Amino acid sequence: MAAEPAMRPTGEAVHAVLDRVTGPRRAEADDLLELLGEVSGEEPAVWAGRIIGFGEREYRYESGHGGREPLLAFATGARQHTVYLANDFAGRWPELVERLGTPRTSTVCLYLTRLTGVDREALRELLQRTLDATSTDATSGADG
């Protein structure tokens, strides 16, 4: 029998996952939960045991690799929040990333130590552009 993919909804309670985080990041996680829910119009679900995802889509690369992923997602850990965005979001929309301050970025991840001082409208716009891009961009999948 084939193993279940790691990136899938796990059925855990969203607040149980968020309650693993303590201190000020816990309240910020609630802010992210509300923001991503508003932008996506979707209910949150836990993916891979720690990622809070909103909505779902399937993707497939030219290589044939594919899978499922949330339309929008974030994870909150002890050191930072990770917001999952469209492939090469920092290259596509550098003006929005600049407005966030000095976040760390990777191909699809925005790393925010705290939400204090983050331009929420710029973050909202990045989320909206990601949502728009995922409906047309088949290469914004997990291995981007």
Image (spheres, rainbow, N blue to C red):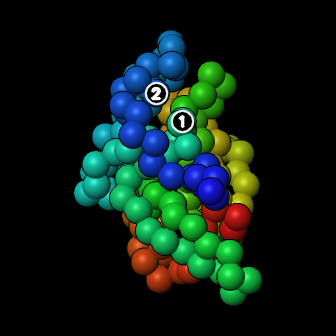
36 displayed left or right of 62: left
Seen at 62% across and 56% down, the residue is 1
**Quarter residue 27 falls in:** top left
* Mark linked to residue 17: 2
Q: Amino acid at mark 2?
A: Val
Residue 38 in percent (x, y) is at: 27, 51
Residue 52 in percent (x, y) is at: 45, 42
Marks 2/1 in contact by CB < 8 Å: the verdict is yes
- Depth check: 76 or 20 in front? 20
128 displayed left or right of 91: left
Q: Quadrant of the C terminus?
A: bottom right
- State the SS at label 1: loop
Q: Of all residues shown, which one is farthest toward the bottom?
A: 62
Seen at 50% across and 13% down, the residue is 23
- Depth check: 93 or 57 in front? 57
Q: Earlier in the sequence, mark 2 or mark 1?
A: 2
**Quarter residue 46 falls in:** top left
Seen at 43% across and 77% down, the residue is 135
Q: Amino acid at mark 1?
A: Arg
Residue 97 in percent (x, y) is at: 60, 56
93 displayed left or right of 11: right
Seen at 53% across and 36% down, the residue is 49
- State the SS at label 2: helix
71 displayed left or right of 98: left
Residue 6 in percent (x, y) is at: 61, 49
Q: Is residue 81 above or below residue 17?
A: below
Q: CA distance from mark 2 to mark 1?
A: 6 Å
Q: Does any portion of residue 123 appear in the rendered image? A: no
Q: Residues within 10 Å of mark 2 (few under 14, many from 20)?
A: some
Label 1 belongs to which residue? 50
